Image (tube, rainbow, N blue to C red):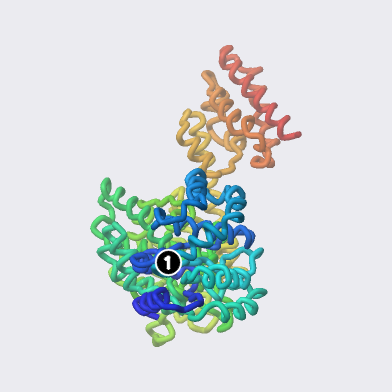
Amino acid sequence: MENIQLIEGLSNYVNGHDQFAVMIDGPWGSGKTYFLKNTVMPCIREEHKVVYFSVYGYESLAKLKSELIGNLFISSLSKGLDKADKQFKTEDIVSIVKEVGGVVWDKFSVFKTLAETTEGFVINRQLRSQSQDSSPVLIIDDLERISREIHTSDLMGFLLTDIIEPYGYRVIVVGNSQEIRDDELKEFNMTREKVVSRIFPFTYDFNNVKQEFFQNSGNCFLQDDAEWLVGIVADHARYNRKQINLRTLEFILTTFTIIDRDLDQYWDRNTQGKADSFQIKRSVFANLFVIATEYREGRLTRDNLSLVDRLLNTRNFFFLHMKDDEEKSAAEKITLRYHDDTNLNQVIMYDSSVNDVVFSSVFDAKSFIKSWMKLFRPREKGSSLDEVANFRNMTDGQLEDLERQLLQDSQSPTASVNDILSTINNFLFFDQNDLYFCEGDYLLTLLDALRNAVSTLSDNDFLYYRADIGIMYSILAEDKDTLKKVQDILESAETAKHELHAEQLVNAIFENDYETMRDITQSGLRTNVFRTVLDSDYLGTDLLVASSKAQLLDRYLHSEYIGISNSKDFHHGENSDILELSHKIEVFTNDSLEIGRIDKFNLNNLLKTLKEILSKFSE
């Protein structure tokens, strides 16, 4: 039904003489409650008293009945209170209502005794009196979310016999019949036939979405680009044969306001990407729309976010398969669910900063803009990797030219680790299917390119773990020999990066650079500072010398080893290095004629700390 037809149907019902309820039936999150509260209720309130009541959260039918009757009674007093019969102490009931305020029915046991003795005089009479002017309306919402302790059939029977028939209420039941529990469905359907005269199917009008969620959002970008943004939402619903979930949409728009604010604040101080702000916001909205929808529908969690790593910081969303029936990865399933939309596919990219804002409400505008500029601005045309998806439509010569270009691109100083791994994956596929046309050892070339790429990574750049390669590059994962070579290169780079961080940490200790120590420690790096000190020049330039900086190392060890109760869990295998360092300090302190008493004092304190750590680790 169109919304205007639904409003007309509900208006005819509440103004008619139907002695049954009606039901609005639609998927969870499709906007039924929003539509009722913002469109239907303001319309019918002009001539009818309206009570909205959600059944969600009640654990017993008795409690639900009590609170519902109480709500109806309070509503009935809101108009014409001066006409109520004074002799039945209506004032006493009103005083109880005022006393308990917003939590009226937390004290319902106090009211219940009074209600039981006066039901025939006050509540019953008051509720019956309403229908003399115009029928009151009761909206029962969230039917499918009712407690397992309450049978929906019992609730429906109560509405008919205790609300509709004695008091003349027009009852609108709102829910999703598809979500009624299986063990209740048969009985519910039988009862519904006796209680509900009409069922109105509900779908939310996309024109209303545009007006109410985008143009009325107060956000300039959402208002100005509402047509395009609603198209993204509508096309996704249409392609996947689903209704729009307005709760998910509200989450997306609320999250986007955080992103939009941080982007604008970044551009207040920086010019990078500012000229492309409109397109960047489209890209970030598309990224957010996909990740937030996957999260809200339960497919993405904090624990399985690595499933989308294959999509990060690339425009190559093509997946090769050796077998037609091969199980698709989670990343590929996402592209199949969303990327058929041409408008979305033209702007989509994925960045970890959007994952962060979905799960933690923290957005790194600089990171997203940097990734966007790298993916969209350097290329005047699509990359060679993007063209692989169309190889089936090429001639042999065209594919050979593409392969040559891929090999050339992989050797570029700007080639990313991700792109090189994708290229290796593609070439293995071509080779195994007799589609490799170039001469020479492509694998040798690509592995050299991978070594060069990982050697130029900055400290914070991402390197893949073993499990991630298997998930993201299925053909590479099946070639055990090539997989091992790739993993050796990545692990070698990871080890080098780890050693660099360790050296930076030790340098920060002896330079008393607290900020760097804190950043490296909070990054989760687990390093053996004792081994690093022993293998470095710091031993002879900063520690075992006159004017020793032993007190700085001692202070760090107290903070990160002594002061942390479970430090043993993070520093396996360091005992022998602690012993070796202790021995060198003892020998130097005993034999050196150059150091003064303060140096000896500091070195001896460090020695005591090392022994304390050993004692702690041996417990």
Compared to residue 165, the image places residue 111 above or below, namely above
Residue in the foreground of this view, choosing between 463 and 80: 80
| Residue shown at 26% from the left, 60% from the top | 276
| Residue shown at 67% from the left, 32% from the top | 578
Residue 414, x across and y down, in percent = 38, 60
Residue in the foreground of this view, choosing between 188 and 299: 188
Can residue 223 be seen here? yes
Q: Residue at label 1?
A: 246
Can residue 348 be seen here? no
Residue 255: quadrant of the picture: bottom left
Which residue is the extreme one toward the top?
597
The image quadrant where one finds the N terminus is: bottom left
Residue 272, x across and y down, in percent = 28, 53
Which residue is the extreme one toward the left?
275
Label 1 is placed on what type of residue?
A: Leu
Residue 481, x across and y down, in percent = 61, 68
Badge 1, how many Cα within 10 Å: few under 14, some, many 20+?
some
